[in-house]
């Protein structure tokens, strides 16, 4: 069985699980939006995996999808009052996993620029983000997080920095601002976000590597701490965080923007929003209020 067939088998299993459970948990109204969102994302993953050439799908992709279904199987076994937070974390695994599939499609589109299918799939994912109001969801979650150092009046709340970044993105898309300026603002959000999480978990006081401090933060700020599914998923997001910071730093340095394609900028914004939401889904936000 090739990689695509393996991935298709797992994603079909996840889609059937979510479709079945959606009809069984109608009394759990608070959790229903998580199920519906996950179904939409899983449907996109299923269609995308089916269209990707086998050589584009690696073992990590399959492991990510297996992690998604594992988290949902666990989440759907919970009863109240843990059902909603469990499905929230499981949705985070969908967002994280689908964003990595999105990266595969984006890379494929750059290698085969004449092929329209990858561009259609990228656009579909971006449309899902818009229809699910990911920007609004991220903003609402960031709004609950206290400032990194509440005693310092000059420290701006992370949600304010996010709003500045989204405004810069809007200006860049409209031609009223530069993509490098938007890149700077998005990178600032990521840096401040990570700094806030480290500060609130006391990981900033550690003397270890960034990886060790991220793990310490994940242990302190997830609901069930080290060893839990949300802890494992959050630890994996450090790699995504680092790659995004690097890509945004490169964008911020650009002087000549005429040869920078709109699709490249759109993809960076999509990844930026997906990463922020995935991390926020894995966190216990009550510990950050």
Image (cartoon, helix red, strand yellow):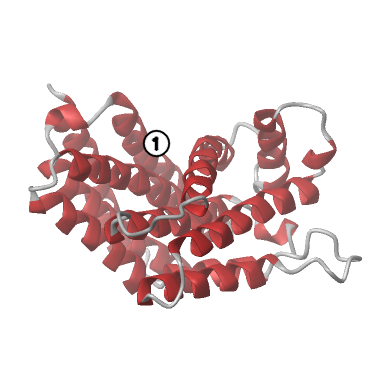
Is 146 rendered above or below residue 136? above
261 or 269, which lies in front? Answer: 261
* Residue found at the very far top of the displayed protein: 1
Percent of width and height locating residue 103: 32, 43
Residue at 84%, 69% (x, y): give it. Answer: 154
Percent of width and height locating residue 244: 49, 45
Bin the neighbour count of mark 1 within 10 Å (Cα to Cα): few under 14, some 14-19, many 20 and up. many
13 or 145, which lies in front? Answer: 145
**In-image side of 140 versus 115 (left or right):** right
Give the residue number, with chain letter if any, for mark 1: 67
152 or 249, which lies in front? Answer: 249
Percent of width and height locating residue 156: 75, 69
**In-image side of 106 versus 268 (left or right):** left
45 or 74, which lies in front? Answer: 45
Is 69 rendered above or below residue 27? above
Residue at 79%, 49% (x, y): give it. Answer: 199
Percent of width and height locating residue 43: 22, 55
Using the rendered image of the protein, determine whether residue 76 is visible from the camera's viewpoint: no
Is 159 rendered above or below residue 234? below
**In-image side of 207 versus 18 (left or right):** right
Residue at 29%, 61% (x, y): give it. Answer: 262
Residue at 34%, 60% (x, y): give it. Answer: 266
**In-image side of 255 versus 37 (left or right):** right
Using the rendered image of the protein, determine whether residue 25 is visible from the camera's viewpoint: yes
Quadrant position of residue 8:
top left
Q: Secondary structure at mark 1?
A: helix
Quarter of the figure with the N terminus: top left
User: How many marks are shown on the rendered structure?
Assistant: 1
* Residue found at the very far right of the displayed protein: 151
Quarter of the figure with the C terminus: bottom right
């Amino acid at each position: 069985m090739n990689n695509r067939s393996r991935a298709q088998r797992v994603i079909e299993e996840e889609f059937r699980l979510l479709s079945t459970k959606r009809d069984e948990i109608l009394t759990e109204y608070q959790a229903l939006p998580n199920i519906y969102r996950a179904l939409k994302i899983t449907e996109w993953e299923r269609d995308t995996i089916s269209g990707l050439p086998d050589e584009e799908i690696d073992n990590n992709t399959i492991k990510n999808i297996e992690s998604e279904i594992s988290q949902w199987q666990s989440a759907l076994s919970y009863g109240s009052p843990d059902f909603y937070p469990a499905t929230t974390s499981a949705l985070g695994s969908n967002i994280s996993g689908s964003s990595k599939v999105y990266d595969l499609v984006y890379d494929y589109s750059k290698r085969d620029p004449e092929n329209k299918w990858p561009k259609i799939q990228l656009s579909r994912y971006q449309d899902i983000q818009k229809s699910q109001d990911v920007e609004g969801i991220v903003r609402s979650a960031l709004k609950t997080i206290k400032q990194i150092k509440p005693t310092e009046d000059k420290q701006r709340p992370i949600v304010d920095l996010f709003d500045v970044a989204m405004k810069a993105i809007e200006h860049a898309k409209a031609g009223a601002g530069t993509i490098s300026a938007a890149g700077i603002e998005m990178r600032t959000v990521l840096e401040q976000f990570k700094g806030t999480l480290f500060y609130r978990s006391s990981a900033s006081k550690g003397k270890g590597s960034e990886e060790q401090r991220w793990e310490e933060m994940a242990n302190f700020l997830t609901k069930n701490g080290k060893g839990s599914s949300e802890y494992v998923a959050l630890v994996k997001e450090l790699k995504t965080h680092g790659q995004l910071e690097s890509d945004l730093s490169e964008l911020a340095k650009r002087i000549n923007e005429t040869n920078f394609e709109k699709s490249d900028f759109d993809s960076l914004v999509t990844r930026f929003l997906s990463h922020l939401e995935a991390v926020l889904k894995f966190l216990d936000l009550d510990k950050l209020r």
